[in-house]
Amino acid sequence: VTIFHGRGGSLARGGGPMYLALKSQPPKSIQGKLRLTEQGEMIQAKFGIAPQVATRQMEVYTTGTLLATLEPPSAAKEDKWRSLMDSMAEVSCQAYRGVVYNHPLFLDYFHEATAESELGNLNIGSRPAHRNKDKKSVSSIRAIPWIFSWTQTRFGLPSWLGVGVALHDAIDQGHVEILQEMYNEWPFFQSLLDLVEMVLAKSDLRIAKMYDDILIQNPKLLEFGEELRGKFTETVEALNAITGHTRLAENNKTLRHLITFRNPYIDIVNILQANILKDLRLDPNNKKLRDALLITINGIAAGMRNTG
């Protein structure tokens, strides 16, 4: 096992539970070796708290590597599975880009509904939030602030946007039984949906809407936010139709317990953050407000466990 710095915690940046990551690798791609990276705060959480926790993490890595080597996950059993995946990938990509790159309201909504603009003024990153400060666009936003901003508002948009559209499209074409078969028999597809489900379970539409209500004045942007939350709900419905779950992360009792335990604490910090953002935008040079915002950012990141 080779460990080096760099792996992000969020699904949208390639993160997620290690056992799912190994389970979804192509058969025989892991031959007794695993190269992975860990992001700074993940190193602290996994290896800097207690020797027992660090030992447990090493057990997860080594056991997963051995299992993936000796009992590699099965590949897609039928060509139609791969064909359907290719088709859904194209539909999902078009749906994602249609919103993020082509919708005229998206960038304004992103700036107003999240802390993206304020993150650039806080000393929490090694590089500027935008590659091009003079011409800010979606393409200029660096990966970490892009994911971080959506995670803070409990919306997680980059991790699920487009997935629901692709799944609904396949279901409407009569492929629901094939999708259910893929979920039950193809580890890669099961891991993919379980990871998306994990992000959805950690998200909270009430909190996301609260940010809109407190921070956005433009009625058109408020309507756009409602439209995006509708896409979130459609994604949940599509996942449940395939997995057979009646609630998100139903097959992961540990995650459900952790979410139930953490949310009351994170909710309060989100309420504080939204109101701090509102005040800070009226008084952008207020150091106390900026310090308070930084504290809420750290608190939400610690509670969500998927920072970006």
Image (spheres, helix red, strand yellow):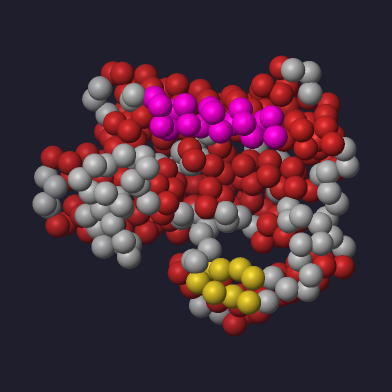
| In magenta stretch: residue 92 | yes
Instruction: Look at the picture and state if 205 lies above or below 30.
Output: above
Instruction: Look at the picture and state if 85 lies above or below 69.
Output: above
Residue 14, x across and y down, in percent:
57, 54
Residue 168, x across and y down, in percent:
66, 23
Q: Quadrant of residue 65?
A: bottom right
Q: Residue at x 47, y 26 (%)?
A: 98
Residue 195, x across and y down, in percent:
64, 46
Q: Which residues are magenta?
A: 86-103
Q: Nearer the viewer, residue 195 or 282?
A: 195
Q: Residue at x 26, y 53 (%)?
A: 120
Q: Can residue 274 be seen?
A: no
Q: Can residue 142 be seen?
A: yes
Instruction: Look at the picture and state if 233 lies above or below 262.
Output: above
| Residue 4 appears left or right of 142 | right
Q: Residue at x 59, y 82 (%)?
A: 51
